């Protein structure tokens, strides 16, 4: 038998070892957060823990857009080509959408329509229409006319609410607004005919200045507002549906594990949060002349304006 030179043997052995080492490396996952604070941390920690439990081989690297510039994060993602991105928050998800050919699981966002469903899915913060109308009935049982503004951006949500409201014998008092200058008059028209105003997730309509105007006018017209989260309740909405951020993180981690196991994002529907609670503002209730039932106050996850 011809002898194999020692150097060749070493190269074969070392080369095999190196190949094995690379083969043993798990898939890389980029965890991109819009900020390193509060809800983002609760959700990201839960997401990472859930993903590691289901896919212990995954190698997770975290990036925070309030600590590293988005451009630098984008460059690192392009250089490292992760197997998957998990994004938390709108700015993080918009950045992830720019990275070509990488599947993304997103969360902590309200609006998902602008993102490519072929390679992006996840958990939205926008609670289902059925649950919103049920909470309105619980807190304001006599409310029958629900005010609402929507734009082309949120027309799908409006149509879903309209169908559900019809089934529940409720009337939607709605106006479509696609121009910012039309917002004040449209809001005035709707509030004058409504028992309650329901905010929909639509960044084109609701931003700090318009929300301030909405809450001010709602007090003037004595019409309670159902906000999008506890941020709005704290600011002056009467009540809002909220999500458990850690639970949203776990839910997103489960979806991320499925994508990492080669399920197509296109085959996984965007999911609503599976665990919710509501917040109320007692100061707003007093200003509106609304007496909230004591059991409602006890059941609230957060109470402002005591």
Image (tube, rainbow, N blue to C red):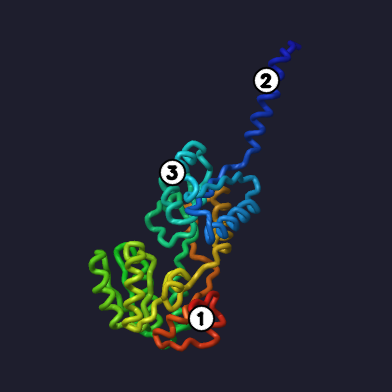
Q: In this view, does 193 lie to the left or right of 256?
A: left
Q: Which of 67 and 32 is in front in this view?
A: 67
**Res 100 quadrant in image:** top left
Earlier-in-chain disc, 1 versus 3: 3
Decide: few, some or many residues near mark 3? Use Cα within 10 Å; few <14, some 14-19, many ≥20: some
Q: Which is in the foreground here, disc 1 or disc 3?
A: 1
Residue identified by numbered label 2: 11
Q: Helix or strand or loop: what does disc 1 sit on?
A: loop
Q: Is residue 147 left or right of residue 231?
A: left
Mark 1 and mark 3: Cα distance apart in space: 47 Å
Measuring 55% from the left and 53% from the top, which residue is drawn there? 256
The number of callouts visible is 3
Mark 1 and mark 2: Cα distance apart in space: 74 Å
Measuring 48% from the left and 51% from the top, which residue is drawn there? 66
Measuring 29% from the left and 63% from the top, which residue is drawn there? 152
Residue 250, horizontal then vertical, whole percent: 58, 59
Q: In which quarter of the image is the N terminus?
A: top right
Residue identified by numbered label 1: 306
- In the rendered view, tell whether residue 275 sits above or below residue 23: below
Mark 3 and mark 2: Cα distance apart in space: 37 Å
Q: Can residue 267 be seen in this view?
A: no
- In the rendered view, tell whether residue 240 sits above or below residue 58: below
Measuring 34% from the left and 79% from the top, which residue is drawn there? 218
Residue 151, horizontal then vertical, whole percent: 30, 66
Residue identified by numbered label 3: 99
Pointer 3 and pointer 2: residues touching (CB < 8 Å)?
A: no
Q: Helix or strand or loop: what does disc 3 sit on?
A: loop
Q: Which is in the foreground here, disc 3 or disc 2?
A: 3
Earlier-in-chain disc, 1 versus 2: 2
- In the rendered view, tell whether residue 305 sits above or below residue 242: below
């Amino acid at each position: 038998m011809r002898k194999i030179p020692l150097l060749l043997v070493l190269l074969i052995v070392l080369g095999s070892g190196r190949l094995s080492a690379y083969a043993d490396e798990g898939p890389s996952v980029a965890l991109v957060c819009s900020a390193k604070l509060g809800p983002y941390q609760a959700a990201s920690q839960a997401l990472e823990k859930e993903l590691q439990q289901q896919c212990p081989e995954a190698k997770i690297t975290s990036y925070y857009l309030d600590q590293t510039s988005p451009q630098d994060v984008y460059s690192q993602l392009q250089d490292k080509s992760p197997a998957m991105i998990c994004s938390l928050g709108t700015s993080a998800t918009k950045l992830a959408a720019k990275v070509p050919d990488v599947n993304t699981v997103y969360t902590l966002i309200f609006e998902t329509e602008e993102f490519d469903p072929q390679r992006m899915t996840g958990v939205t913060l926008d609670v289902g229409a059925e649950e919103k109308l049920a909470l309105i009935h619980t807190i304001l049982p006599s409310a029958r006319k629900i005010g609402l503004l929507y734009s082309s951006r949120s027309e799908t949500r409006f149509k879903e609410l309209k169908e559900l409201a019809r089934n529940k014998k409720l009337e939607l008092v709605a106006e479509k607004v696609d121009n910012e200058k039309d917002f004040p008059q449209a809001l005035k028209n709707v509030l004058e005919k409504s028992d309650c105003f329901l905010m929909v997730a639509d960044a084109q309509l609701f931003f700090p200045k318009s929300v301030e105007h909405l809450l001010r006018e709602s007090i003037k017209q004595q019409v309670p507002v159902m906000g999008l989260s506890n941020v709005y309740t704290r600011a002056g909405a009467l009540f809002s549906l909220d999500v458990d951020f850690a639970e949203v993180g776990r839910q997103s981690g489960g979806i991320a594990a499925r994508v990492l196991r080669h399920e197509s994002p296109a085959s996984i529907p965007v999911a609503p949060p599976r665990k919710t609670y509501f917040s109320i503002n007692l100061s707003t209730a007093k200003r509106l002349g609304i007496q909230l039932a004591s059991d409602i106050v006890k059941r609230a996850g957060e109470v402002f304006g005591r």
